[in-house]
């Protein structure tokens, strides 16, 4: 019989709009943003963090007129 386990989460960080929890058993991260909850592995969260950082950098550069978004000449 395959027994489902519930994650035993502990809060790692809490901000104005995002709470991050980690499971003590499997290591998965739970990201809670408003009504949205997303469960990801740590390496996926690190990749998403890097991509979000690049996007924010591009957004600010675009506002300054120094960079065009991907796919635009």
Image: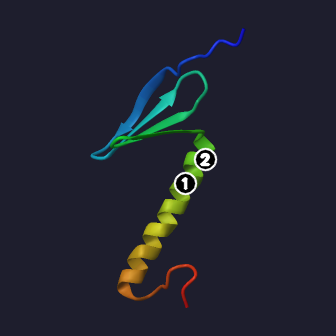
- Quadrant of the rendering where the N terminus is positioned: top right
The residue drawn where x is 58% and y is 41% is 42
Instruction: Tell me if mark 2 has few (under 14), some (14-19) or many (20+) residues whose alpha carbon lies within 10 angstroms of its own.
Output: few
Q: Secondary structure at mark 1?
A: helix
- Residue 64 position within the rendered picture, expressed as x and y whole percent measured from the top left: 36, 85
Q: Residue furthest top?
A: 1
Count of numbered labels shown in the rendering: 2
- Quadrant of the rendering where the C terminus is positioned: bottom right
Q: Residue furthest left?
A: 16
Which residue matches tag 2?
Answer: 44
Q: Residue furthest bottom?
A: 73
Q: Are marks 2 and 1 in contact (CB under 8 Å)?
A: yes
Checking the image for residue 66, the label placed there is none
How much space separates mark 2 and mark 1, taking CA atoms?
A: 6 Å
Q: Secondary structure at mark 2?
A: helix
Instruction: Tell me if mark 1 has few (under 14), some (14-19) or many (20+) residues whose alpha carbon lies within 10 angstroms of its own.
Output: few
- Residue 26 position within the rendered picture, expressed as x and y whole percent measured from the top left: 61, 26
Whether 57 is drawn above or below 45: the answer is below
- Residue 27 position within the rendered picture, expressed as x and y whole percent measured from the top left: 58, 30
Q: Is residue 33 left or right of residue 53?
A: left
The residue drawn where x is 44% and y is 88% is 66
The residue drawn where x is 36% and y is 82% is 63
Checking the image for residue 48, the label placed there is 1
């Amino acid at each position: 019989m395959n027994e489902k386990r519930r994650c035993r989460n502990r809060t790692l960080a809490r901000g104005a709009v995002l709470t991050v929890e980690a499971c003590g058993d499997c290591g998965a991260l739970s990201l809670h943003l408003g009504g949205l909850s997303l469960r990801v592995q740590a390496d996926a969260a690190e990749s998403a963090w890097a991509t979000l950082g690049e996007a924010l950098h591009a957004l600010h550069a675009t506002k300054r007129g120094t960079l065009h978004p991907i796919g635009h000449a």
